[in-house]
Amino acid sequence: MARNLDPKCRQCRREGEKLFLKAEKCFTDKCAIERRAYAPGQHGQKSGQRLSGYGQQLREKQKIRRIYGVLERQFRKTYFEADRRKGATGENLLQLLEGRLDTVAFRMGFGGSRAEARQVVRHNGVLINGKRVNIPSYTLRPGDVVQLTDATRAHLRTKAALAAAAGRGFPEWIEVDAAAGKGIFKAFPQRAELSSTINESLVVELYSR
């Protein structure tokens, strides 16, 4: 299975903002963005560099890919599915990414990061409507019940991730019982409920070239 093995803090610095790829570290002053808020590499501290229109579109696509942990081929496939559906393509794209099992597992606190939540899914630690599903890209439907297996819920790391997520609060589009390690995917999120730092229209422009 292909994976992005680039250092996670380096990815955040390249995009110039927190992508929350390192679990609890991202919420402390140890975060790389807090210490070195410039791009990595020999020329990272040079200021005044301007991107072309294409460059801005490409950077936005890379940022979204890194946030959701999706490789290029899978991201492109998701985009074309979003374009095929009715409604705004950009919003459809974000909804499809948010509807992935690994993303929902992360939102519910089953892992401290998306990568950790994806590992829980891959290791058969998640049930959907009582059935075991180990495909991170599985798209949920509104009303689906997602829960941890008893063995996975007993892990100390999983308990810590659930407690941390409960402390920060859960999104409106999911309902979570942290004590039971169980939640309901109520609906696909509306655009206003998602991050305002994402400019999905740039991605639409990029693929419309």
Image: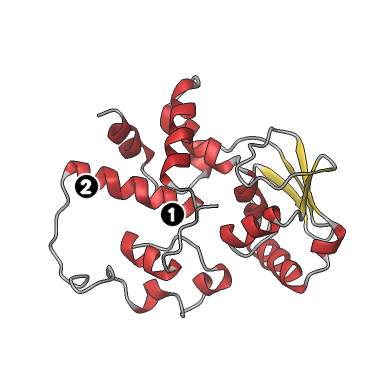
Instruction: State the image coordinates of residue 96 (x, y, percent, origin top left).
Output: 54, 36
Q: Secondary structure at mark 1?
A: helix
Residue placed furthest toward the front: 1
137 on left or right of 151: left
Tell me if mark 2 has few (under 14), some (14-19) or many (20+) residues whose alpha carbon lies within 10 angstroms of its own. Answer: few
Foreground residue among 47 and 127: 127
| Mark 2 to mark 1 CA distance (whole Å) | 16 Å
Mark toward the start of the polypeptide (2 vs 1): 2
Residue 108: image x %, image y %?
A: 69, 54
Residue at 60% over, 39% down? 99
> What's the residue at 52%, 71% (across, down)?
27
Judged from the image, the secondary structure of the residue bearing numbered disc 2 is helix
In the picture of the structure, the residue carrying the numbered disc 2 is 55
The disc at residue 186 is: none
Kindly indicate the quadrant of the structure image that contains residue 6. bottom left
Identify whether 35 is placed above or below 86: below
**Residue drawn 65% across the image and 59% down it:** 119
- Compared with 174, 14 (above or below) is below
Q: Quadrant of residue 49?
A: bottom left
Report x, y in % for residue 208. 29, 28
Three-letter amino acid code at the position of disc 1: Arg
Residue located beneath label 1 in the image: 66
Q: Residue 67, image x and y in percent?
A: 46, 54
Residue in the image at 49% along x and 27% along y: 81
